[in-house]
Every structure is written in structure tokens, then in C-alpha cells.
Image (tube, rainbow, N blue to C red):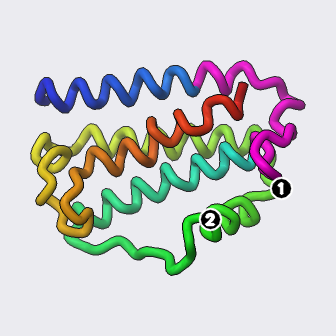
Amino acid sequence: MSERRDAFLARLDAARAELDAVIAAVSPEGWEATVDGAMRRVDLLAHIEWWERRGSYEIRTLLAGGTPEVSEESLDALNERVTTENRGRAAVEVRTAEVAAWAELRALAATLSEEQLYDPGAFPWLEGEPLKKMIKVESSAHWSDHLNHFR
């Protein structure tokens, strides 16, 4: 492993530890609280799970030499669909599934070479962005956007 990659993974792990601590403090009844528009905490965690799974899908597809499929929906419409599709799931199920989704994304990130993570030309589908940015967007940056919703 490279120092640069180790440092990136350590930053992801630190951000994850913060999210885990905030989530652990949510009471069982707190998962049903509305925290963002019409979204409940449980809906928001399912939303995070979906984006983590999306990140894993994109990495696997890119590593296989493919091009990830992109929805024609706007981001808002996509997020609304994800919320609707996940409504009704129990908080304990969503929490377990989200932990698994993060574990998969983290494991995939750990397999990447420094070149795959940092070279902006490594994956043309990313249009000049390094893969590490996409991983961050689907994990630590996304969690940061929603941390206060879990408090």
C-alpha cells in the first residue's frame, strides 16, 4: 500500500467513525422522526445506503472495463424514487444494510492502486476526475451533508 492511499482510507475511516457515533446515538423511536423535508431518519439512511451501493457498482463496472449506466432522471427525481422504493423498511434492516453497503465500498476502495485512485485519466467515464473523488462523494462527503439530520 502507498502512504497516499493509506491516508485517503484513514480519512474515510475517520469520517465513518463520526457517522457511526452519531447513528448509534439515535433512539429507536428517533428513526421515525422527520428530519429533511418529508424524509425520516430511516429514509435518509436508506438514501445513503443506496448511494454507497451505487459507488460500489460504479467501481466494479469501471474495473471491468465497462461504463456504468446513468439514470435519465434528475438528481432530485432519482433521490425521490430511492426514498419511495425504500419506504416501509424497518430501521434495524436499513442500518444493517447500510453497514454492509459501506463495508463493500470500503473494501473495493482498499483494492485500488494509487494510480486507479488518483490518476484523473484512469477512467475516462469520470471525465477527468480521479476515482477517489467519486468514492468521497458517495461516502464521507455525503455523510457530512447529512450528519446533522441524525443528531
Identify which amino acid the numbered label 1 is placed on: Gly
Mark 1 lies on a secondary structure that is: loop
Numbered tag placed on residue 61 in the rendering? none
Identify which amino acid the numbered label 2 is placed on: Asp
Name the spot of residue 43 as percent of width and height, x first.
74, 49
Query: Do residues under tags 2 and 1 come within 8 Å of each other at their CB atoms?
Result: no
Give the left or right position of residue 28, taking residue 151 as reference: right
Q: Residue at x 83, y 56 (%)?
A: 88
Name the spot of residue 22 as percent of width and height, x first.
65, 22
Name the spot of residue 103 as percent of width and height, x first.
45, 39
Q: Residue furthest bottom?
A: 72
Badge nearest the viewer, 2 or 1: 2
Disc 2 crowd rating (10 Å Cα; few below 14, some 14-19, many 20+) is few
Name the spot of residue 13 as percent of width and height, x first.
40, 25
Instruction: Indicate whether 59 appears above or below 85.
Output: above
Q: Quadrant of residue 5?
A: top left
> Distance between the Cα atoms at labels 2 and 1?
20 Å
Q: Residue furthest right?
A: 29
Q: Is residue 32 magenta?
A: yes
Give the left or right position of residue 34, taking residue 146 as reference: right
Residue range in magenta is 20-41
Disc 1 crowd rating (10 Å Cα; few below 14, some 14-19, many 20+) is few
Residue carrying label 2: 76
- Ranked by sequence position, the earlier of labels 2 and 1 is 2
Q: How many marks?
A: 2
Residue carrying label 1: 88
Q: Is residue 123 magenta?
A: no
Q: Residue at x 79, y 50 (%)?
A: 37
Q: Quadrant of residue 36?
A: top right
Mark 2 lies on a secondary structure that is: helix
Instruction: Indicate whether 132 appears above or below 84.
Output: above
